[in-house]
Amino acid sequence: MTTTEAGATAPSETASEPAHTTHGYHKQKDEHLKRLRRIEGQIRGLQRMVDEDTYCIDILTQVSASTKALQSFALQLLEEHLRHCVADAALKGGDEIDTKVDEATKAIGRLLRS
C-alpha cells in the first residue's frame, strides 16, 4: 500500500493479494457497482448544487446523505471481508489469520476516524 497526497492509502503494485484472487465482495460486485454509481450521482449533484449557488444548509444535508451512503457501503464491504477473507484465513490456520484480523482492525480504525 502507498499513501497519497491526501493521506489516503492506495493499493501498491505489490499488493498482498494476487490479482486473480476472488474477494469476498465478488458475488455482490454488480450490486456494489450500482450502489457506487448512485453515490457518484450524489457527488455530482453536490457539484451541481454549488454551481447553482444552492443554500449552504441544503448542500450540507446532501453531504451528510453522501457520507452516510459511503459509510454504509464501507460497512457492507467490511462485513464481506470478515465473512470471506478472515474466515478463510481462520480455516487455513497459521499466521494468515493474524494478518487478516490486523488488516480488518486497521480498516475499522480508519472508518472510525472518518
Image (cartoon, rainbow, N blue to C red):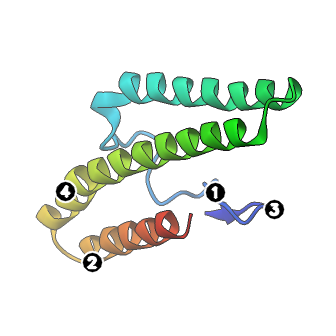
Q: CA distance from mark 2 to mark 4?
A: 12 Å
Q: CA distance from mark 3 to mark 1?
A: 14 Å
Identify residue for label 1: 12
- Considering every residue shown, the one lying at the far left of the view is 91
Q: Amino acid at mark 3?
A: Glu
Residue shown at 28% from the left, 52% from the top = 79
Q: CA distance from mark 1 to mark 2?
A: 22 Å
87 relative to 94, above or below: above
Identify residue for label 2: 95
Q: Are marks 4 and 3 in contact (CB under 8 Å)?
A: no
Q: Earlier in the sequence, mark 1 or mark 2?
A: 1
Residue shown at 25% from the left, 71% from the top = 97
Q: Earlier in the sequence, mark 4 or mark 3?
A: 3
Q: Amino acid at mark 4?
A: Asp
Q: Residue 42: give its label.
A: none
In the displayed structure image, the side of residue 109 where residue 14 appears, left or right: right
Q: Amino acid at mark 1?
A: Ser
Q: Secondary structure at mark 2?
A: loop
Residue shown at 56% from the left, 63% from the top = 114
Pointer 1: residues within 10 angstroms few (<14), some, or many (20+)?
A: few
Q: Earlier in the sequence, mark 2 or mark 3?
A: 3
Depth check: give the residue in front, 110 or 104: 110
Pointer 3: residues within 10 angstroms few (<14), some, or many (20+)?
A: few
Q: Residue 5: give its label.
A: 3
Find residue 98 and report its image quarter: bottom left
The N terminus: image quadrant: bottom right
Identify residue for label 4: 88
